[in-house]
Amino acid sequence: MNTEKKKAGFTPLDEILNETFGAKETPQRAEYDTQTELWMVGQKIKEIREARSLTQEDLGKLIGVQKAQISKIENGKNLTIATIIKVFKALNLDAKLLLEDVELSLS
């Protein structure tokens, strides 16, 4: 650890993540990173929904699910590519998804 940062009371985020979830490229860290990314997608969906003055129930009706499922989606749970595409289409979003260097249009 960088002793200057330790003296100042700061620990670099990467060091905390390595200690808590394992080094990059380990299965535990990959799972953490995946869950974090899914949560961020869910939060972006929530932000867009709220900006359009839609309730979770409203969005649920647009994609054919219950309000509880929208809550799960916004928290990064049960979030699949198919669900993301449904939500993006319902919100009339123009987005691109990059998977292993293969670009997919979600509009």
Image (cartoon, rainbow, N blue to C red):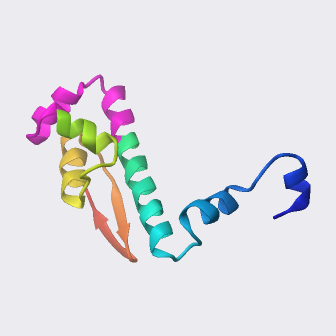
Q: Which residue is drawn at 26% across and 36% down?
A: 71
Is residue 4 shown left or right of residue 57?
A: right
Q: Where is residue 23 in the image (x, y as percent from the top left)?
A: 59, 72
Q: Which residue is drawn at 15% across and 35% down?
A: 60
Q: Where is residue 38 in the image (x, y as percent from the top left)?
A: 37, 54
Say which quarter of the image contains residue 62: top left
In reply to whether residue 9 is colored magenta, the answer given is no
Q: Residue at x 29, y 67 (%)?
A: 104
Looking at the rendering, the stretch of residues picked out in magenta corresponds to 45-67
- Residue positioned most to the front: 20
Q: Which residue is drawn at 47% across and 62% down?
A: 33
Up/down of 99 relative to 89, above or below: below
Up/down of 73 relative to 82, above or below: above
Give the position of the C terminus as an image quadrant: bottom left
Say which quarter of the image contains residue 61: top left
Q: Where is residue 72 in the image (x, y as percent from the top left)?
A: 26, 42
Q: What secondary structure predominates along the stretch shown in magenta?
A: helix
Q: Please give the count of numbered marks on the rendered protein.
A: 0
Front residue (pair 12, 55): 12
Is residue 72 shown left or right of residue 2?
A: left
Up/down of 11 relative to 102, above or below: above
Give the position of the N terminus as an image quadrant: bottom right
Front residue (pair 107, 84): 84
In reply to whether residue 50 is colored magenta, the answer given is yes
Up/down of 11 relative to 103, above or below: above
Front residue (pair 91, 81): 81
Front residue (pair 50, 78): 78
